[in-house]
Image: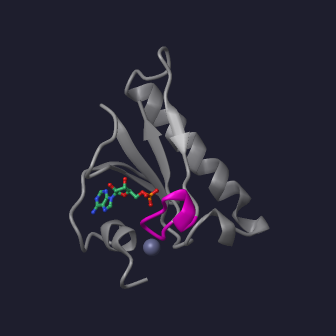
Amino acid sequence: MDHCIFCQIINRKQPAKIVHEDELAVAIEDIHPQAPVHLLVMPRKHLPSLTEAEASDEPLLGHLFAVSAQLARERQLTTKGYRTVVNNGPWAGQTVSHLHVHVLG
Ligand code: AMP
Ligand code: ZN
């Protein structure tokens, strides 16, 4: 997806603070943090939102949350707690149409 900002970040065509990378997912620091720790965990695959995910994407969806928990542990967020948020569609406040999990702690 040439015009997708998150695809551009994943393909290193736009700068970002990448905090995790593997074969399925990339995680970055949010450019406008809403909490002391605000990370975005996204699939390499361009899925506009959770709505477009298919049955075959189930392992990928699980992986996004596994990575989210791993990052939360690395950032020592687990004792006090943290939020994992997925906004889907305009009325939910989704502004970037590439599925991502917010990790807020
Ligand atoms: P959402 O509103 O759920 O679609 O979340 C999009 C998030 O992406 C917002 O929290 C933005 O601050 C963040 N964001 C947008 N562009 C960038 C970027 N280039 N680098 C890092 N975070 C971004
Ligand atoms: Zn994309």
What's the residue at 49%, 14% (across, down)? Answer: 79
Q: Residue furthest left?
A: 15
Color scheme of the displayed model: one colour
Q: Position of residue 96 (x, y in %)?
A: 42, 67
Q: Residue furthest right?
A: 55
Using the image as rendered, state which of residue 53 and residue 86 is in the foreground. Answer: 86
Q: Is residue 97 magenta?
A: yes
Q: Quadrant of residue 5?
A: bottom left
On screen, residue 60 versus residue 74, left or right, reads right
Q: Is residue 72 above or below residue 95?
A: above
Q: Is residue 39 magenta?
A: no
On screen, residue 36 versus residue 21, left or right, reads left
What's the residue at 40%, 28% (across, down)? Answer: 74
What's the residue at 55%, 58% (across, down)? Answer: 92
Q: Is residue 37 above or below residue 53?
A: above
Q: Where on the image, by quarter, is ligand 2? A: bottom left
Q: Position of residue 26 (x, y in %)?
A: 42, 56
On screen, residue 97 versus residue 5, left or right, reads right
Q: Quadrant of the N terminus?
A: bottom left
Q: Quadrant of the C terminus?
A: top left
Q: Is residue 92 above or below residue 104?
A: below
Q: Determine the main secondary structure of the stretch shown in magenta.
A: loop
Q: Residue furthest front?
A: 91
Number of numbered discs: 0
The part of the chain drawn in magenta is: 89-98
Q: Quadrant of residue 11?
A: bottom left
Q: Position of residue 51 (x, y in %)?
A: 67, 67
Q: Position of residue 31 (x, y in %)?
A: 26, 52
